[in-house]
Amino acid sequence: MTTEPAIRVQGVTKSFKEVQVLRGVDFDVAAGTIFALLGSNGAGKTTLVRILSTLLKADAGTATVNGHDVAAKTAEVRESISLTGQFAAVDEVLTGRENLILVARLRHLPNPGAIADELLARFSLTDAGKRKAATYSGGMRRRLDIAMSLIGDPPVVFLDEPTTGLDPQARIEVWQTVKQLAGQGTTVLLTTQYLDEAEQLADRIAILHEGTIIQNGTLSELKQLLPPATVEYVEKQPSLEDVFLALVGDSSRKDT
């Protein structure tokens, strides 16, 4: 028996007047995995996420999320997902805890305070929970934004360019958060234009170029598309990330 994919996209097209943005996109995302949609600006990544999250209708093709057709079962799809856009959508006037409580109340969930406290602890924000979100660093705001999107335990999460505009340390914080999500069984579809981000996070990577998927596979499968490398002895030099972490210390999860 085969397990139905958490996300299935078949032949999806979308045009805006004369501009054809998506030209027949196909891919599956297995449940509980991180799938990176990698492409440059204008490749169609955000358009595809908007279609999958029922914010936009495709011109042709089909897509299902958590077993629900995105065109015919919009309510069921919206109950199954969360969407985090390119910029954090937190209310800066409220504290971190108040932001979480507000969303829990809007979703009519019992014990919103307990939900907020659990998520603050889960995302290493407990000490900052009583501070206004306006005082948070970029990484903390993004972690709070993702925490807000997880209220109600959606099985599928869309992260559209989640580290846009973040500094290197904040990016690492978000990467750790995304890995935690998948480790707890959440399906994550991540759009990015950063090669290192896809390499660090994704179980599978699809390269979207000029509106179509030109390659789709694991990192090792994609690397095999290139000719074998010549093996030579080279002294390993530290990467920029190694230098950065050595200088700033292992403080990427602290609320500073």
Image (tube, grey):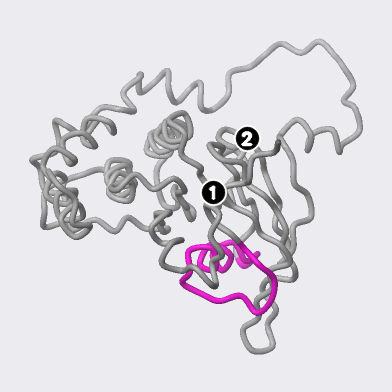
Count residues near mark 1 (Cα–Cα under 10 Å), then give few for <14, some for 14-19, many for 20+.
many
User: Where does the C terminus fall, quadrant-wise?
Assistant: top left
Residue 234: x %, y % from top left: 76, 13
Q: In the image, which disc is placed on residue 189?
A: 1
Q: In the picture provided, is 65 more to the left or to the right than 251?
A: right
Disc 2 to disc 1, C-alpha distance: 10 Å
59 magenta-colored:
yes
Q: In the rendered view, would you say 10 is above or below 171?
A: below
Marks 2 and 1 close (CB-CB < 8 Å): no
Amino acid carrying mark 1 in the image: Leu
Q: In the rendered view, would you say 85 is above or below 178?
A: below
Q: In terms of sequence position, does the residue under pointer 2 or pointer 1 come before the other?
A: 1
Q: Is residue 228 among what the camera can see?
A: yes
Residue 124: x %, y % from top left: 25, 30
| Residue found at x 67% / y 43% | 205
Q: Label 2 belongs to which residue?
A: 203
Amino acid carrying mark 2 in the image: Asp
Q: In the picture provided, is 72 more to the left or to the right than 255?
A: right
210 magenta-colored:
no
Residues 31 and 40: in front is: 31
Residue 105: x %, y % from top left: 15, 55
| Residue found at x 51% / y 21% | 242
Disc 1, SS:
strand
The stretch of residues the image draws in magenta is 42-63
Q: Quadrant of residue 21?
A: bottom right
